[in-house]
Image: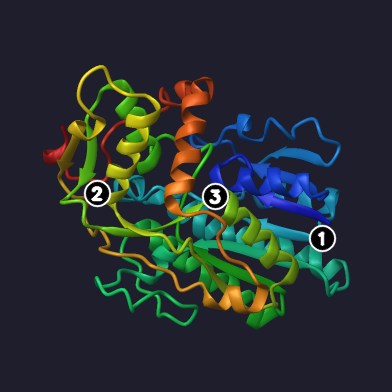
Amino acid sequence: MKILVTGGAGFIGSAVVRLAVSRGHQVVNLDALTYAACLDNVAEVADSPLYTFEHADIRDPAALTRIFTTHQPDAVMHLAAESHVDRSIDGPRDFIETNITGTFNMLEAARAYWTRANTPAGFRFHHISTDEVFGSLPNDPAQKFTETTPYDPRSPYSASKAASDHLVRAWHETYGLPVVLTNCSNNYGPYHFPEKLIPVIILNALAGKALPIYGDGSNVRDWLYVEDHADALLLALEKGKPGHSYNIGGENERSNLELVQTLCAILDAKRPKAAGVYADQITFVTDRPGHDARYAIDPSHIRAELGWRPSVTVEEGLERTVDWYLANESWWRPLQARQGVGVRLGIKDTDRA
């Protein structure tokens, strides 16, 4: 299968690219190489005859038309997106232009290509989204997001992703474009850009800096190891039913404080400090506006229909992640110098440190 992957130099996209090539798929990686992208993420497959890179922006319809015409993919996996909630609060325009308009451009380019190819039955447009479109859950283990949970986005980021989901469904219902949608919980693992919680905690701990936790640390997330997610995404692409949505969760709910404490304990064992423990560096900081209390996915639909479930617990995944960051300073060190990395975003100017 030849797969066009948008955002393939990003965190989740690069995991998909690496896994797809390892399984013998041809992959065309379309990426604009914005601040969070890094071609080192796909270095292990860059020399493969199965891999091609296209430096292009999904906001450029002419570029998309050229890429579809040139490469004639059997399927699309659309991951390109602005994804950092704090950045969306500070500057929502990029999120609207990329996540909404960019998805519209991808749908139109895919529809034109699919139509020219006489609507091949095997073609798929797989749109990868987030559980944040569903809003916030109460602290009740019995309540989880399902594929029928009403949308209730609370941030510019989640609103832009909700809008893109609606566009994809509309192109299926209106034009018959064969689409599959997936909504995932919080990802973590190797190559995670160092502005997100887990890499921030690991790298700040190693540098002797404060370990910032929003509010009182009680916000709960369901954590999904990125390589498990990539496996689920390829499965949904290959076996998912057109027009269907699949929620992909790690079945690993933890509060932010519990997660950071676990990371500190792992680091204590693997890279002990000269004095004290890493948890001594935990600092509670002003919460961000509209911070959702809890996300939790019910993955029973994808488990029952496609037979998928996560392969690691969050403790196992975090240990692998810490090992990877300890062994790959040459990857993360240069990224810390990029604009906005390590700077508190998404708060009022009067709250900035």
Q: Residues under labels 1 and 2: Cα distance?
A: 43 Å
Residue at image mark 2: 257
Residue 78 versus residue 169 in the image, above or below: above
Residue 106 lies, in percent from the top left, at: 65, 59
Query: For residue 241, what is the image quadrant?
Result: bottom right
Q: Is residue 120 visible?
A: yes
- Give the secondary structure at mark 3: helix
- Give the secondary structure at mark 1: loop
Q: Residues under labels 3 and 1: Cα distance?
A: 24 Å
Query: For residue 297, what is the image quadrant?
Result: bottom left
Instruction: Mark 2: give few (<14), some (14-19) or many (20+) Cα within 10 Å.
Output: many
- Inspect the image, locate mark 3, and give the three-letter code of the amino acid beneath it: Val
**Mark closer to the observer (1, 2):** 2
- Give the secondary structure at mark 2: helix
Residue at image mark 3: 226
Kindly identify which numbered label has been placed on residue 261: none
Instruction: Mark 3: give few (<14), some (14-19) or many (20+) Cα within 10 Å.
Output: many
Q: Is residue 99 left or right of residue 240?
A: left
Instruction: Mark 1: give few (<14), some (14-19) or many (20+) Cα within 10 Å.
Output: some
Residue 76 lies, in percent from the top left, at: 71, 59
Q: Give the residue drawn at x 50%, y 78%.
A: 147
Residue at image mark 1: 74
- Inspect the image, locate mark 1, and give the three-letter code of the amino acid beneath it: Asp
Q: Are marks 3 and 1 in contact (CB under 8 Å)?
A: no
Q: Earlier in the sequence, mark 1 or mark 2?
A: 1
Q: Give the residue drawn at x 45%, y 64%.
A: 251
Q: Give the residue drawn at x 15%, y 32%.
A: 353
Q: Residue furthest top?
A: 274
Q: Residue furthest left?
A: 350
Residue 77 lies, in percent from the top left, at: 67, 57
Q: Is residue 2 left or right of residue 188?
A: right
